[in-house]
Image (cartoon, helix red, strand yellow):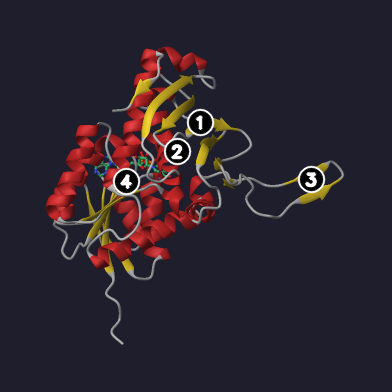
Amino acid sequence: MPKTKSINIGLIGAGRIGSFHGETIARRLVDAELVAISDPAPGAAGRLAETLDVDAAYSGVAEFLSHPGLDAVIIATPARFHTNVVVQAAEAGKAIFCEKPMALTLEDADRAIAAARAAEVPLQVGFNRRWDQSFAEGRAAIDAGKVGAPQLVRSLTRDPGPFGADPDRIPPWTIFYETLIHDFDTLLWLNAGAKPVEVFAVADALIRPDAKEKGFLDTAVVTIRFDNGSIAVAEANFSALYGYDIRGEVFGSAGMVTMGDVRRSSMTLFDQSGVFSDTWRRDTDHFIHGYTAQLASFVQSVRKGKLTQGPTGSDARNALAIAIASIESVSRKQPVIIA
Ligand SMILES: NC(=O)c1ccc[n+]([C@@H]2O[C@H](COP(=O)([O-])OP(=O)(O)OC[C@H]3O[C@@H](n4cnc5c(N)ncnc54)[C@H](O)[C@@H]3O)[C@@H](O)[C@H]2O)c1
């Protein structure tokens, strides 16, 4: 039997999540190869290339995109660069996996979608929760009609604390563009086919009130009304001291599914002071299987030449529309109607 051709993948952005995705391609997938890395920070691409036994390291995207035999790219730069890199990669004819958010404006989202469409290249976006076993099974139960008509839908992200980042280095509205964007996609995906019609968001700096004056927000709740009558809530906080807590819930006319568990495993310690479970502390531990499955699926799509499964550019745009409406709602202290 002929051996399946390995898909040649290049990584753009060798930071925290890019390094992890690079490691997934290089070490966890058998039918893909990491062949090149690009990062403008001095030494960043070279260091990761050495760790992962990759021969080619670049500082510029244009030069990187000319790497011989490159089939596809993973974009893991900071969010503000995503759209331009998506367009550049599409114009070079490469299949694209782009971390979320794909864009920060609806115009840029349209630009990214149009570029991938014009080049006829697959474009997948990094909404990894869809690949988590618990969330995938929840969606399957909903599709099988076990929950009935969705009435209340919930998704939450509580990042592991203590929060130690410098608020000055976090771009404005990050809680909506980069954190809750996962929850917005999850709500849309669990409530498949329903369109958001109204958004009301409140947000505050409860962990770092001293940073609020400069626009920093670390806690938010968003209420979303959908055109099928269901009402959804998304919430986020940057410092859950007990661990990395990601959960979802759909309550409907026939029942309810809940998804996600902050406990690391079913190992439970019983001793004289009580009953204890360890918790997830890092996204890359909690979602290692989901992160790997999303890239395995991407590789399959690259092989087939079209996105067969997984979040598309349009899905990224739909989640972004809720993020933008949330920001407007917080700014105006009013509900916002989504056209
Ligand atoms: N899906 C998830 O669960 C998840 C988790 C973490 C981060 N992310 C997303 O991934 C993106 C990156 O996050 P991070 O935490 O890894 O950031 P990071 O700051 O650790 O890394 C970003 C890297 O990109 C490099 N870079 C900057 N401009 C570049 C360019 N034009 N070309 C190539 N490289 C460039 C930087 O030098 C840096 O090494 C963000 O959009 C973030 O929201 C997603």
The residue that label 4 is drawn on is: 76
Are the residues tagged 3 and 1 within 8 Å (C-beta)? no
- Amino acid at dot 4: Ala
Neighbours of disc 1 within 10 Å: few (<14), some (14-19), many (20+): many
Q: Nearer the viewer, mark 1 or mark 4?
A: 1
Query: In this rendering, would 5 be left or right of 152?
Result: left
Image side of residue 289 versus residue 315, left or right: right
**Which of pointers 2 and 4 indicates the residue nearer the eye?**
2
Q: Position of residue 92 (x, y in %)?
A: 13, 54
Vertical position of residue 36 compared to residue 234: above or below = below
Q: Disc 4 beta carbon < 8 A from ligand 1?
A: yes
Q: Which residue is mark 1?
A: 235
Whichever of labels 2 and 1 marks the residue nearer the N terminus, that label is 2
Distance CA(mark 3)–CA(mark 4):
40 Å
- Is residue 57 among the parts visible in the rendering? yes
- Looking at marks 3 and 2 on the same chain, the residue that comes earlier in the sequence is marked by 2
Name the residue carrying label 3.
Answer: 275
At label 3, counting other C-alpha atoms closer than 10 Å, the crowd grade (few under 14, some 14-19, many 20 or more) is few
Q: Name the quarter where the N terminus is drawn.
A: bottom left
Give whichever of discs 3 and 4 has the lower sequence position: 4
Q: Which dot, 3 or 4, sits closer to the camera?
A: 3
The percent position of residue 169, horizontal first and vertical second, equals: 38, 27
Q: Could you say whether the residue bearing mark 1 is in a helix, strand or loop?
A: strand
Q: CA distance from mark 1 to mark 4?
A: 24 Å
Kindly identify the residue that appears in the image at 17 percent across and 59 percent down: 67
Residue positioned 32% across, 38% down in the render: 318
Q: In 3D space, how far apart are the residues under numbered discs 2 and 4 (Cα atoms)?
A: 19 Å
Q: Label 2: few (<14), some or many (≥20) within 10 Å?
A: many
Look at mark 2 in the image and give the residue it sits on: 183
Residue sitting nearer the eye, 294 or 46: 294
- Indicate which disc, 3 or 1, sits on the residue closer to the N terminus: 1
Q: Secondary structure at mark 3?
A: strand
